[in-house]
Image (tube, helix red, strand yellow):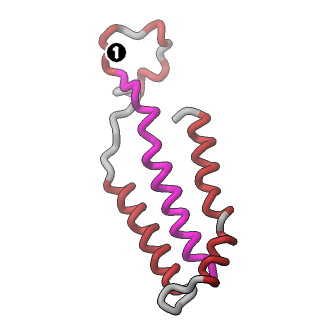
Amino acid sequence: MEGQATTSARALLGIPWSIKVFIGIISDCFPICGFRRRPLMIIGWSLCMMCLVAMATLPLEKPYFPEASWRTLKPSAYTAEEIAAINFHAPATGGKYIVLMMLATLGYVLHTVY
């Protein structure tokens, strides 16, 4: 992933921690089935578990370079075969993992709001 995508990922992972106070207020004002915190603990851990299982079972995309030794070559030294083998869409495949990590963090934060 590029630098801006990594920075965006760090910001997205921090959002659930920023709204933790509001989640606590909502859970106190609107109890679920008469309980204030127990349903949030169950929902939070379930969400976290589902996201972690999804990340573990998602197939990995093809890497940018098929062979690690190509990383040391300068782009001007690439052959036509090497250019054809490079996966130029690899940097864009990290978005689904970022969203799943953010949702897993939200699940963990839901659990800790007591």
Residue 52 relative to residue 26: left or right: left
User: Which residue lies at the image location 63% right of the left edge and 57% below the top edge?
Assistant: 15
* Residue 94 percent location from the top left of the image: 45, 41
Closest to the observer, 77 or 11 = 11
Residue 109 belongs to magenta span: yes
**Relative vertical location of residue 54 with respect to residue 87 in this rendering, above or below:** below
**Relative vertical location of residue 11 with respect to residue 104 in this rendering, above or below:** above
SS category of the residue bearing label 1: helix
Closest to the observer, 86 or 46 = 46
**Relative vertical location of residue 106 with respect to residue 59 in this rendering, above or below:** below
* Residue 66 percent location from the top left of the image: 34, 27
**Looking at the rendering, in which quadrant would you find the C terminus?**
bottom right
Residue 31 relative to residue 69: left or right: right
User: Which residue lies at the image location 46% right of the left edge and 76% below the top edge?
Assistant: 43
* Residue 38 percent location from the top left of the image: 51, 86
Find the magenta span and give its range: 86-114
Q: Which residue is mark 1?
A: 82
Residue 69 belongs to magenta span: no
